[in-house]
Amino acid sequence: LGDLYKMQVYALAEIFNQRATSNNQIPPVNKSTMTKPPSAELAPNQKDEDSLPPYEVLDEILRLHIEHTMDADDIVAAGYDRSVVVDVLSRLERNEHKRWQMSPAPRVTSKAFGQGWRRPLASRHDWRD
């Protein structure tokens, strides 16, 4: 699941639960997992959306940039707030080193983080141009 967006993971979990329920089995994903606000749990009562846009917006900005190679101006032209777009793309760039440390994950999309997505760490890739 390493290359799925948050909302895709939720949708997949919902499918798993629906299939289990229709087969008279216990749903594999707890309801609390589906309803609890996402959190990195780095601080008490911290939620992802305290510092990030809603995942519906975040996922779409990332999808447009990663899968459609749109830069910040193109994403803003698609209707997204410039400050949100710049923040999301800046975070993506700042955290590239973490993706280099990822363990292998099943590849589900054509632009998986891992071999499908490698940005140089030493040279400057500027998506703002």
Image (cartoon, rainbow, N blue to C red):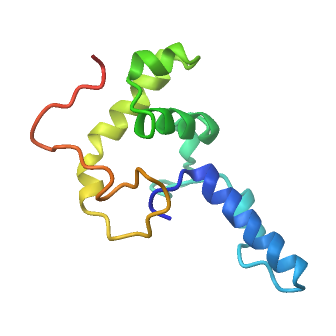
| Relative side of 16 to 88, left or right | right
Residues 49 and 26: in front is: 26
Q: Which residue is at a point 60% across and 41% down the rendered structure image?
A: 55
- Asked if residue 11 lies left or right of residue 4, the reply is right
Q: Is residue 82 above or below residue 111?
A: above
Query: Quadrant of the image for the C terminus?
Result: top left
| Viewer-nearest residue: 54 or 13 | 13
Q: Residue furthest left?
A: 122
Where does the image place residue 39, in percent across and percent down from the top left? 55, 54
Q: Is residue 111 left or right of residue 120?
A: right
Residue 42 placement (x, y as % from top left): 45, 56
Percent coordinates x, y for residue 2 in the rendering: 45, 62
Q: Give the residue drawn at x 75%, y 63%.
A: 14
Q: Residue at point 29% right, 58% down? A: 115
**Which residue ends up furthest to the front in the rendered image?**
110
Q: Is residue 123 above or below residue 127?
A: below
